[in-house]
Structure formats: C-alpha cells, structure tokens
Image (tube, coloured by chain):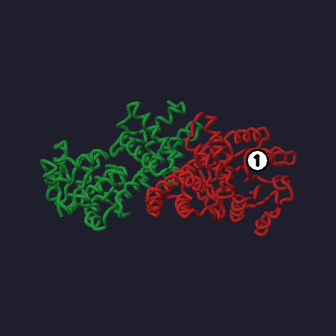
Chain colours: A green, B red
Amino acid sequence: MKVAFIGLGNMGSGIAQCILKGGFDLTVWNRTAAKMNPLVANGAKGAASIQEAVANADVIITSLMDDKSILDMLQAEDGILANMKPGAVHVCVTTISPRCADELTDLHKKHGSYYVSAPVVGRPDAAASGQLTSFLAGDPQAIAIATPVCSAYSKQVTAISEKPSIANSMKLCVNYNVISVIEMMCETYTLAEKCGVPLEHMRDFYQQSLFAHPALKMYAEKLRSRDFTGRGGFVMKAGLKDVTLMLSTAEAVGVPLEMGKIAERKLKAGIAAGMEETDWSAIYEITRQEAGLS
Amino acid sequence: MKVAFIGLGNMGSGIAQCILKGGFDLTVWNRTAAKMNPLVANGAKGAASIQEAVANADVIITSLMDDKSILDMLQAEDGILANMKPGAVHVCVTTISPRCADELTDLHKKHGSYYVSAPVVGRPDAAASGQLTSFLAGDPQAIAIATPVCSAYSKQVTAISEKPSIANSMKLCVNYNVISVIEMMCETYTLAEKCGVPLEHMRDFYQQSLFAHPALKMYAEKLRSRDFTGRGGFVMKAGLKDVTLMLSTAEAVGVPLEMGKIAERKLKAGIAAGMEETDWSAIYEITRQEAGLS
C-alpha cells in the first residue's frame, strides 16, 4: 500500500517514522523541506511537491495545524484534491472542528475520494513511540483501508462512527477533560499551598489514588514542581486553539462549558504574558498569581 | 485500649464495626439509641450517656454531622470535654472546617487532652469494609496512639502534619477534586450527547484511560446510566456542606475556586428541585437541563 504523509511537525514526524517502521511504502512532503531529511534517511521518499506526494497514494495522511491549513491545502490548484486518485482515502489526524470535518467529507464525496477523521490522543513522545490512541470515523470501507496504517502509530484504534465529525467531537471531549483536570489541579495545589498542606501529599493522592493515565500522572508532577519545559510538550497556543474549538462546538449545540471558559481565560492571560510556547499546564502560574502567590 | 465511638450514622456505624472487629474494647453512643443495637449484638458496650461512653476511654472517636454538632457536643455540660480523662485522645473523622479544627485543638489543650483531625476519604461501603483512606494531623504522640485504631477501618493511614487543621484542608482538597471531576463529566457527557458521540466511548475513555480510582470509575458509569440511587451514596445536602466548606476555606486564604462556584450553583439548583437526598453526582441532571436535554 502506498502512503503519502503531509506535515512533519512535532506530531507528524513521529507518526511518519512509525508508518515507515511499519513497512509501508511512504512518501513524505513538508513545506520546510529539511524536515523530510530524517525520514528520507530511513527510507521514505521525499516529494518535491504535494502533487508528487499524493499522485499515486492509496492513503494520504495530513498532520497540519488547524481548519484553515487543511482546507487550503486540500482545495488549492496544486493541492491534494486536484492531484489525488479517486477512490483514495484521506486521513486527517489533526484536531479540527466537527464543522470542518463535515466540509472535508463533502469535498471528498464530490471528488470521488474518501475522508476519514482520525484525531489522535497523546503527546509527541507517544507519537514517536507508536503509543497514540486513534478515534476513526468515516465510511466503513475507508476505515478498513486506513486502520492498518493508523495501527502503525497507535496502541489503540477505535472506529466510533460512520460520520467523520463524530471523531472530532470525541477528541474535543477528550481534550476538554485533560485541560479541566489541569485547571482542577491548578486550583487545588494553590488552595493546598495557601492552607499549608504539603503539596507532595496532594501529588501522591493524584498519582496513587485518583489518576491512572501516564499523561495525568505527568501533569500532577509537572504542576507540583512548576516545571513547564521539557520534551513532548503541548504548548499554550495549541491548547488555546483546542479550547476555542471546544467552546465554539459547545456553543453550536447549545451546551454551556463553564470550566472551558475558565481555562480559556487563563490560557489567554498566559499567552499575553509571553508564555505561548510554554506547556498549557502553565496556566497554574496564572492561578497562583490570582491567589497572590509569587 | 478502651475506645469510645460517638455518632453511628452511615459512615460511623461502618467504622465502629471495623474497630470492633479489630479487637478493641469498644463503647458506643448514639442519640437515636436503636442504632447501637447492631454493634451491641457484636460485642460493643452501649452507653446510656456521653458521660458513660467517654469516662474511661483512651481514644474517643466522633463521627458527627458538621462543625456545630461537634463543638456543641464537646462543650456541653454533660458533653465530651467535661467527662473525658486528661491525656485521652479525641479523634474526629468528620469533614469539618480547618477553623473548627483549630478551635477543637485549643479546647483540648486547655483541658489537658489531645485532638487529632482524622478525616476519611471513601463512601459508606468503604467504611463498612475497612477500606477508607485516613489523613491524620495533630500531636505526634496522640497520632501514635490513634493510628492502630484508625488502621482498623482504613486501607491507608497517612500522618501529614502536627497541626490538626492541615488534615481538614487536605480532605477539602480531595473532595474538591471529586466534585470537580463529576462536574467535568457532567459537561462532557452533555456535550458528547448533543454532538452525537456515543456515550459508551466517553465512559470507556474514562474507565480505561483516564481514571484508576474505583470511586471515579463508578461515577463514570453512574452519570452515563443516569442512575443516582444505590448504596453508599453521598447525598447532595452533604455535598453542598462540603462545597461550602471548600469555598469558605478558599476565601479565607484568598484563592478563587471557580469550578467550586459552578458545583455550588448546581448543587443548590438540585436541592431546590427536591434532590437533596440524591447522590451529589446528580448535578448532571441540572447540566442536561441547562443544555436543553430532557
């Protein structure tokens, strides 16, 4: 099976390496061509254009920034849709809006190709080690074609609906819980500190009693130590994009997300204070400031 | 060692049975005398008065409702302080305010007795099976005396401070996380439902990926099935008492608890709608109503 991979950022480069290790015939393309080198060194073909990358592909995976970048690249004259085979499957791993997924579905239907939403849960280190969780939604036959490729970078692949946007809604729900847990820990650690409770006891409570997932265990220590650097981070500007998607999706269906508004406000305050490239859990610093801690 | 136990409610009766099974010489007292019968049948002494219960006790455990009930019972003419031995240890397992713990500490110091805050984490079924988690704070010698008794009803006993109120602050932090997680699931399930995401996938995500603790796993299913009945419940009116304590404690130290305000509002709405004896996780019904779901 011929696979094309477009977008070699923090997540994309790890995912593409896993697909390569999985034995697929892989062609990669990235706007900044130098990012293709590590993959080409491992046996991938480096394409000179999007056209060259997608022309013969059975499965095209995009790992881009947001709604706009995926829609632009799909519809451009020298873009994906104009150059891909009818019948081929486009798999999008980015966290995009459910509305954008609906739009992509329509565009592919008109072109005679397939669109599968396949958002991933996990940070860049999980992508690099093939330990992501993937939620797939779309035409069942297209999902069947995409599944072996997605399995190459995922510890778990779950098909959840025939309607692509459902996977995107699911992903927003998942991330809503992660940022809510972070917000919860921000407030709790701050309250504990001001009451004189040793934070180690709270951290132990989280890690030993409340949380099983490695990512949440990691956040429990990240906040306690106030260390918001390090590999595999999810930066504030990407976090704000996700929270904005959660809030607009919720508004569209009429659900008040009150905790989401709290997180949004703190992410904006953090970015305004120059922390846009800091891990999104650094909203703890805003929480501490608001409680008079320095 | 002679142990007196006062307050045989849902939590207290289970705790007292564990102490009895632990082989301690136990005397019990309860305002409604009939609640003593199951313990007396198993070998406890049933006291006719508080005086009789506490006069010879080395350790006195109280499991009462709130700040007021414990302060009243301690200071009454025929109450605990007037009748207990100097040097005896008073262990309070109730979730009370840190300020009340400070007051109890002073009262015991003047009397020549010891006060240990020993709030418990766990629902009535955990109390009955000796699986509570206990946070102990107070004079180290008094904690040493109390620990074997607390171990009889706890899977884990952690001494966290020499200042009793720190254990109460810790307990409020713990419960703040439980109600925050419930609020988080209320909002997420409601968003998922309105977006068309099958709730089973969210429940599986919680139970398999996000949460390890049995109580949180239980809530993930409780909300999905909207079944707020059942044994071992933590009712809304008790939940509101705890949330009120969290908010007043946080206000006293200058920490904004924005998620706590959300939970408080929904608990009050639930109680106003006649759900005061319903599990506190039934704030989900308020969340659903506010999103136009019936």
Q: Name the residue under label 1.
A: B70
| Residue displayed at 42% across by 34% down | A270
Q: Position of residue A10 (x, y in %)?
A: 28, 46
The answer to whether residue A184 is visible is no
Q: Quadrant of residue B202?
A: bottom left
The answer to whether residue B6 is visible is yes
Q: The N terminus of chain B is located in which quarter?
A: bottom right
Up-down relation of residue A268 to residue A78 (above or below): above
Left or right? Give the position of B4 relative to A243. Answer: right
Residue closest to the eye, B16 or B199: B199
Q: In which quarter of the image is residue B45?
A: bottom right
| Residue displayed at 59% across by 56% down | B285
Left or right? Give the position of B186 relative to B201. Answer: right
Up-down relation of residue B37 to residue B293 (above or below): below
Q: Position of residue B109 (x, y in %)?
A: 75, 39
| Residue displayed at 28% across by 68% down | A141
Give neighbour class at mark 1: few <14, some 14-19, many 20+ (Cα, 10 Å): some
Q: The C terminus of chain B is located in which quarter?
A: bottom right
Q: Position of residue A36 (x, y in %)?
A: 17, 47
Element under label 1?
helix
Q: Which chain carries label 1?
A: B
| Residue displayed at 78% across by 41% down | B112
Q: Where is residue B224 in the image (x, y as percent from the top left)?
A: 52, 62
In the image, what residue type sits under mark 1? Ile
Residue closest to the eye, A185 or A2: A2
Left or right? Give the position of B206 relative to A63. Answer: right
Left or right? Give the position of A175 relative to B139. Answer: left
Residue closest to the eye, B193 or B253: B193
